[in-house]
Amino acid sequence: METVTATLPLRRWQGEKATYHLVRFTGDEAETLAAHALMQRLEMGRGRGFGSVKVMARIGETTWKTSVFPQDKQSTWILLVSKKVMKAENLAPGDEISVSATPL
């Protein structure tokens, strides 16, 4: 499967009970992830929870297995970035980061 790579701003989102850090894939990257989600549904007869796609994510030297989640009818895909990854890569909200996601 095709790896999605982009340089994106690290965003902070404040929920009711927690603060999250994330990046948003849009455009061609979002289309690639949406196509993978569609193929999963066709092959398995159903989609994953919340329409998510399992990926191997990479920022800098840090690689981890996680999921990306669709928003806005799959025109945007969200990758959450944990505090552990932020600390390992010395990241702060607003930083422009190079991130890749390979669907599994």
Image: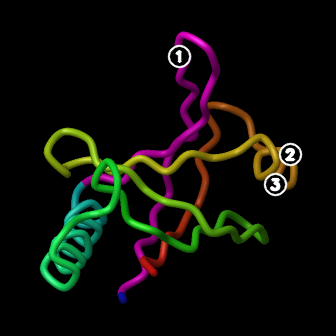
Q: Position of residue 30 (x, y in %)?
A: 26, 60
Q: Which residue is mark 3?
A: 89
Mark nearer the viewer, 2 or 1:
1
Dot 2 corresponds to which residue? 87
Residue 56 occupies which quadrant of the picture? bottom right
Tag 3: amino acid: Glu
Q: Earlier in the sequence, mark 2 or mark 1?
A: 1
The location of residue 81, given as percent across then percent down, is 63, 47
The circle on residue 15 is: 1
Point out which mark residue 64 bears.
none
Whole-angstrom CA distance, mark 3 to mark 1, is: 24 Å
**Highlighted magenta segment, given as a residue range:** 2-26
Locate residue 18 relative to residue 77 in the image: left or right: right
Magenta region includes residue 12: yes
Tell me the distance, in whole angstroms, between the alpha carbons under discs 2 and 1.
Answer: 21 Å
Q: Secondary structure at mark 3?
A: loop
Which residue is depicted at the point 18% across and 73% down?
41
Closer to the camera in the image, 54 or 90: 54
For marks 3 and 1, give the one nearer the viewer: 1
Hey, what amino acid is under mark 1? Gly
- Residue sitting farthest toward the front: 45
Query: Looking at the magenta stretch, what is its main secondary structure?
Result: strand
